[in-house]
């Protein structure tokens, strides 16, 4: 059973630093691979960087709460990670959708939802890891 619904490769570029200012720094991606056909939304992902794997939360969409562009952005918040990735190439394995991208009335509402998204993704990956801990299709993406 394959637990990956799609994957992309990207180079981490500098963004507007909004994620960092609200407590959720993101790796903004310049996509280097074929762009998957996915709905705008938030996804649980596994990121491979130089052979190390990290779980994360990815937003694909136009960031409607900030209303700053109609350009699609790909942003990944890596869980329990505090290194700089600017200029690095990463592979992102998209495992499941958390929710659709939505417009929040203000940034504080967005922050509250991101906290909830992070908690959900952490819990789901714990369950998935437990159920599939000896299966190559999950651990060895």
Image (cartoon, helix red, strand yellow):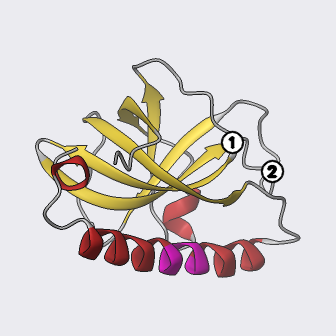
The local secondary structure at tag 1 comes to: strand
Question: In screen coordinates, is 108 left or right of 54?
Answer: right
Q: Which secondary structure type mostly characterizes the magenta part of the structure?
A: helix
Q: Is residue 18 left or right of residue 63?
A: left
Indicate which disc residue 27 carries. Answer: none
Q: Which residue is mark 2?
A: 64
Q: Relative to 23, is 93 above or below?
A: above
72, above or below 16, in the image:
above
Q: Which residue is nearer to you in this view: 116 or 15? A: 116
Question: Quick one: label 1, few (<14), some, or many (20+) residues within 10 Å?
Answer: many
Task: Locate residue 20 relative to residue 102 in the image: left or right.
Answer: left
Q: Position of residue 15 (x, y in %)?
A: 51, 43
Q: What residue do we see at 82% from left, 47% from top?
A: 67
Indicate the position of residue 117 as horizontal and vertical percent values.
Answer: 57, 72
Locate residue 110, reporting x and y percent.
71, 71
Q: Report if the CB atoms under discs 1 and 2 are less than 8 Å apart.
A: yes
Tell me the crowding category of disc 2: few under 14, some 14 to 19, or many 20 or more residues within 10 angstroms, Cα based.
few
Tell me residue 27's x, y (percent): 41, 48
Residue in the picture at 84% in, 59% down: 103
Q: Quadrant of residue 33?
A: top left
Q: Is residue 104 magenta?
A: no
User: Which quadrant of the rendered structure holds the C terminus?
Assistant: top left
Q: Which residues are magenta?
A: 115-120
Q: Image point 54% across, 68% down: which residue?
A: 21
- Pointer 1: what residue? 61
Residue 40 lies in what quarter of the image?
top right
What residue do we see at 23% from left, 45% from top?
Answer: 48
Q: Nearer the viewer, mark 1 or mark 2?
A: 1
Report the front residue among 49 and 134.
134
CA gap, disc 1 to disc 2? 8 Å
Query: Secondary structure beneath disc 2?
Result: loop
């Amino acid at each position: 059973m394959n637990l990956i619904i799609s994957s992309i490769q990207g180079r981490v570029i500098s963004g507007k630093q909004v994620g960092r200012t609200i407590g959720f720094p993101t790796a903004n991606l310049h996509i280097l691979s074929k762009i998957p056909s996915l709905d705008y939304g938030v996804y649980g992902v596994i990121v491979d960087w130089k052979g190390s794997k990290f779980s994360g939360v990815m937003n694909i969409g136009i960031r409607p709460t900030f209303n700053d562009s109609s350009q699609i952005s790909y942003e990944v918040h890596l869980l329990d990670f505090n290194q700089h990735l600017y200029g690095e190439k990463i592979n992102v394995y998209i495992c499941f959708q958390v929710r659709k991208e939505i417009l929040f009335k203000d940034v504080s509402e967005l922050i509250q939802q991101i906290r909830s998204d992070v908690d959900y993704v952490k819990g789901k990956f714990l369950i998935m890891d437990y159920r599939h801990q000896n299966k190559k299709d999950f651990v060895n993406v």
